[in-house]
């Protein structure tokens, strides 16, 4: 992804470079939560994390943090930690499940550096938003199911409260398949949140 980004920058000089998923996620959240006007969408499901700012129902600005869920999995692999249980079909367990620190203390120690980088990157981008915008107190989080609890706890931590100049943590809404119940996905794709959000976005108007 870094090599692709370098090539695109050489040709287009565009910053930030966003995945096509963030605008689709915006259309989906707008459909699911029509009464929400001001919020962030944080998509941490891949190699990087996209952060979109929605003001008055419009996607107004966006940033990218070069750290995401897959980096957390790489930290687990480097530490020699493997999933503690097999999946229902007998195949090896999902390594993302290791992000539950309560399940594996060794992983908790190995994760500190990666967590710090991810948290620092998000805080830096939120500060850049704050230079031109009032920060909304609602954050919609998109991440792999087994990483959601860890990332939600990080976003709700004291390090983020100072950005809003308040002791109260921002409201973090972790999206999951249950939030997109209007979309039915079957077969091997069952429960695939990204696919469900894309399907919902395809039914929404393209204009912002």
Image (tube, helix red, strand yellow):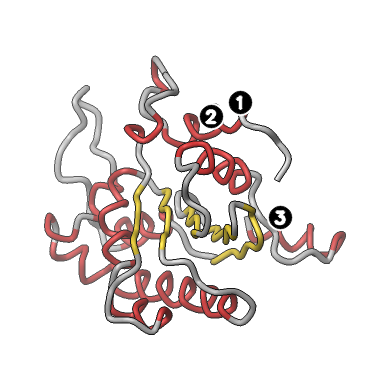
Element at label 2: helix
* Label whose residue precedes the other's in the sequence (2 or 3): 3
Q: Residues within 10 Å of mark 2 (few under 14, many from 20)?
A: many
| Residue 199 occupies quadrant | top right
Residue in the foreground of this view, choosing between 9 and 149: 149
Q: Residue at x 28, y 79 (%)?
A: 158
Q: CA distance from mark 2 to mark 3?
A: 28 Å
Q: Badge 1 is on which residue?
A: 203
| Residue 3 occupies quadrant | bottom right
Side of 42 relative to 90 (left or right): right
Q: Residue at x 64, y 50 (%)?
A: 19
Side of 176 relative to 19 (left or right): left
| Residue 183 occupies quadrant | top left
Q: Residues within 10 Å of mark 3 (few under 14, many from 20)?
A: few
Residue 195 numbered mark, or none: none
The N terminus - image quarter: bottom right
Pointers 1 and 2 in contact (CB under 8 A)? yes
Q: Position of residue 49 (x, y in %)?
A: 51, 59
Side of 154 relative to 62 (left or right): left
Pointers 1 and 3 in contact (CB under 8 A)? no
Q: Badge 2 is on which residue?
A: 200
Pointers 2 and 3 in contact (CB under 8 A)? no
Q: Badge 3 is on which residue?
A: 4
- Up the image or down, 39 lies above or below 154; here it is above
Q: Position of residue 30 (x, y in %)?
A: 53, 43
Element at label 1: loop
- Up the image or down, 67 lies above or below 100; here it is below
């Amino acid at each position: 992804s870094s090599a692709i980004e370098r090539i695109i920058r050489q040709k287009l000089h565009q910053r930030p470079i966003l995945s096509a998923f963030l605008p689709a996620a915006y259309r989906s959240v707008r459909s699911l939560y029509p009464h929400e006007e001001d919020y962030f969408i944080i998509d941490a499901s891949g190699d990087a994390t996209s952060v979109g700012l929605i003001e008055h129902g419009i996607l107004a600005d966006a940033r990218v943090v070069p750290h995401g869920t897959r980096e957390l999995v790489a930290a687990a692999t480097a530490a020699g930690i493997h999933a503690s249980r097999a999946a229902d079909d007998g195949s090896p367990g999902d390594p993302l499940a290791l992000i539950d620190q309560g399940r594996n203390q060794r992983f908790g120690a190995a994760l500190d550096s990666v967590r710090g980088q991810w948290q620092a990157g998000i805080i830096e981008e939120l500060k850049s938003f704050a230079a031109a915008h009032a920060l909304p107190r609602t954050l919609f989080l998109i991440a792999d199911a087994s990483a959601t609890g860890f990332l939600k706890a990080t976003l709700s931590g004291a390090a983020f409260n100072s950005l809003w100049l308040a002791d109260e943590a921002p409201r973090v809404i972790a999206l999951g398949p249950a939030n997109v119940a209007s979309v039915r996905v079957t077969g091997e794709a069952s429960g695939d949140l990204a696919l469900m959000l894309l399907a919902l976005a395809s039914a929404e108007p393209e204009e912002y």
